[in-house]
Image: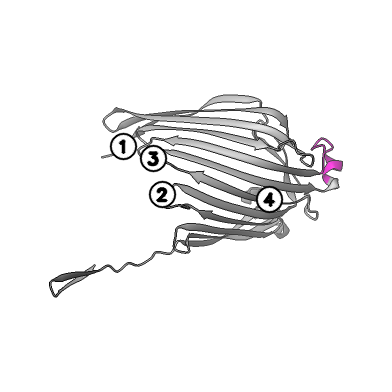
Amino acid sequence: IQYIIKNKQLYITVIVEEQWYIIPYFYIHTAEGSFNTWLQTKQWNTLTYGGKYRDRNFFGRKHLFAVDIAGGFDNYIDIQYVIPYLNKNTNIGLQFEAGLNMNRRIIKQILDYKIDIFRIEKLILKKGFYFLTGISFRPEHHFYLLADFSYHFDKYTDTLFQEYPNFWNNTILNYFKLKVKIKLDYRDYASYPLKGYYYDIILEKYGFDLPFETVNGLFLQTNFRAYTPLCKRLYFGAGINAFTTFNLQLPLFFAFLESSILKASFLSILFQRV
């Protein structure tokens, strides 16, 4: 900050330096899912390699622009653009996403939280794309609402159904999806809370009984976490998670096929150092 006084008037000059929030990085994934397993075969054609680009201050307005591109064993590209503040009150945001994918490895089913993967190294098992648009609303600091609407299209090869006839009743997954999340957050610190509570409810609707849609289902989940001090520098935290499903007409590789679950998610005692 610089200032001068001239002719009984004060002139103040504020010099700022804008920070760039650009984060590019690269990665390598193995088809086996574990690098130690890959070391036993060392098959280079089973590697997926790509890069991510993140600009968290696009146009200098805290817009998020992200691109994720990968090739090799699996191929995909995802593009995301988020406008956190759309109006003068800075309580309405907007987001857009789109992606293409071609996979030689797919999740055949998920039972008891165990993932069963099927792959063919020289054959594309799935081709698909999606696009999404969403809106966020935050009328006050502790309340947050997110709603997004997306379209998904995936086509599976006939070879998959020859190997696993019960995989699904159609080679095409074609559906709209609506997701709504409502969150109340009264924690003192979101990353390492010591006091307060957190509550959210998530609703996901797959398919709307349109003639071309091949899936249908409703998923409802809720989470509650609470934190309270026990004594000086000693705190207690606990949480509960529950979800249920309705009218399921979904493939086995959707991760929430259990009809309903209620469980304690964590129980902890936190100690704060001086």
Residues under labels 4 and 1: Cα distance? 45 Å
Disc assigned to residue 3:
none
Q: Nearer the viewer, mark 4 or mark 3?
A: 4
Q: Secondary structure at mark 3?
A: loop
Marks 2 and 4: in contact by CB < 8 Å? no
Judging by the rendered image, the residue that carries numbered circle 1 is 272
Residue denoted by label 3? 192
- Specify the quadrant of the image occupied by residue 268: top left
| Residue designated by label 4 | 130
Please rate how many residues cluster around mark 3, counting C-alpha atoms within 10 Å: few if below 14, some from 14 to 19, many from 20. Answer: few
Q: Which is more foreground, mark 1 or mark 2?
A: 2
**What is the three-letter code of the residue carrying label 1?**
Gln
CB of mark 3 within 8 Å of CB of mark 1?
no
- Nearest to the eye among marks 3 and 1: give it: 3
Q: Is residue 9 magenta?
A: no
Query: For the magenta stretch, what is the residue range?
Result: 160-171
Of residues 211 and 42, the one nearer the viewer is 211
Q: How far apart are labels 2 and 3 at the CA level?
A: 29 Å
**Label 4, label 3: how far apart the Cα atoms are:** 35 Å
Disc 4 to disc 3: CB gap under 8 Å: no
The residue to which callout 2 is attached is: 89
Amino acid type at image mark 4: Tyr
Q: Which comes sooner in the sequence, label 4 or label 2?
A: 2
Mark closer to the chain start, 1 or 2: 2
Circle 2 crowding by C-alpha within 10 Å: few under 14, some 14–19, many from 20: few
Q: Nearer the viewer, residue 255 or 163?
A: 255
